[in-house]
């Protein structure tokens, strides 16, 4: 029987959406206010969802404390109160859109989990704008 366990997390981060190979005008036309050269920030909400079988000994799919600790070390400590474009290596040459941030989060979490688990990442950039990625 497959069950999904969800863990919510939160981080604040700044970013700028732009492509280095485009002119300022093209970046402005495509990314609008998100192209602000002085950056802008969001209060991101993350939901990491882990699906697997219930362990008959513990009754857990995964110990939520383990999941919490992985999210803290891999995501919160790395992203919280950071400028993603400047301070997070994955975004040195990758536009930190919500889509790309979700993929980076997935790629940071997945190797820390047992391969028997299915992972899905949902990232809220605003309460109404969010993306989901599950490695596909």
Image: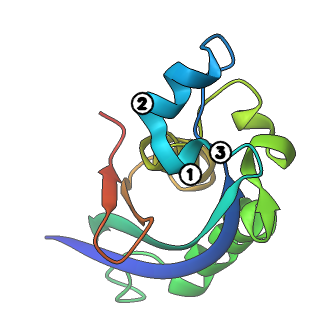
Looking at the picture, the colour scheme in use is rainbow
Of labels 2 and 1, earlier in sequence is 2
Residues at circles 2 and 1 in contact by the CB criterion of under 8 Å: no
Residue annotated with mark 3: 16
Residue placed furthest toward the left:
1
From the image, which quarter does the C terminus lie in?
top left
Relative image position of residue 88 (x, y in whole percent): 79, 45
Position of 120 relative to 47 (above/below):
above
Of labels 3 and 1, earlier in sequence is 3
User: Can see residue 54?
Assistant: no
Q: How far is the residue under mark 2 from the one under mark 1? A: 25 Å
Residue annotated with mark 1: 105
- Nearer the camera: disc 2 or disc 1: 2
Relative image position of residue 23 (x, y in whole percent): 62, 15
Position of 105 relative to 97 (above/below):
below
From the image, which quarter does the N terminus lie in?
bottom left
User: Can see residue 111?
Assistant: yes
Q: How far is the residue under mark 2 from the one under mark 3? A: 12 Å
Describe the element under mark 2 as helix, strand or loop.
helix
Q: Residues within 10 Å of mark 3 (few under 14, many from 20)?
A: many
Residue annotated with mark 2: 30
Name the residue located 59 percent from the left edge and 41 percent from the top edge.
35
Q: How far is the residue under mark 3 from the one under mark 1? A: 18 Å
Residue placed furthest toward the top:
21
Of labels 2 and 3, earlier in sequence is 3
Residue placed furthest toward the front:
25
Please give left or right for residue 69 compared with residue 63 in the image: right
**Quadrant housing residue 10:** bottom right
Describe the element under mark 1 as helix, strand or loop.
helix
- Nearest the eye: 40 or 33: 33
- Nearest the eye: 57 or 26: 26
Position of 74 relative to 27 (above/below):
below
């Amino acid at each position: 029987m497959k069950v999904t366990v969800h863990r919510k997390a939160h981080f604040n981060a700044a970013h700028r959406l732009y492509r280095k190979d485009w002119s300022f005008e093209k970046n402005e036309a495509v990314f609008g206010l998100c192209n602000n050269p002085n950056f802008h920030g969001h209060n991101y909400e993350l939901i990491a969802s882990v699906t697997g079988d219930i362990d008959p000994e513990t009754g857990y799919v995964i110990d939520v404390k383990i999941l919490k600790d992985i999210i803290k070390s891999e995501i919160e400590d790395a992203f919280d109160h950071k400028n993603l474009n400047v301070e997070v290596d994955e975004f040195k040459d990758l536009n930190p859109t919500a889509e790309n941030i979700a993929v980076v989060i997935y790629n940071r979490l997945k190797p820390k989990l047992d391969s028997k688990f299915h992972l899905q990442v949902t990232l809220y950039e605003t309460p109404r704008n969010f993306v989901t990625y599950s490695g596909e």
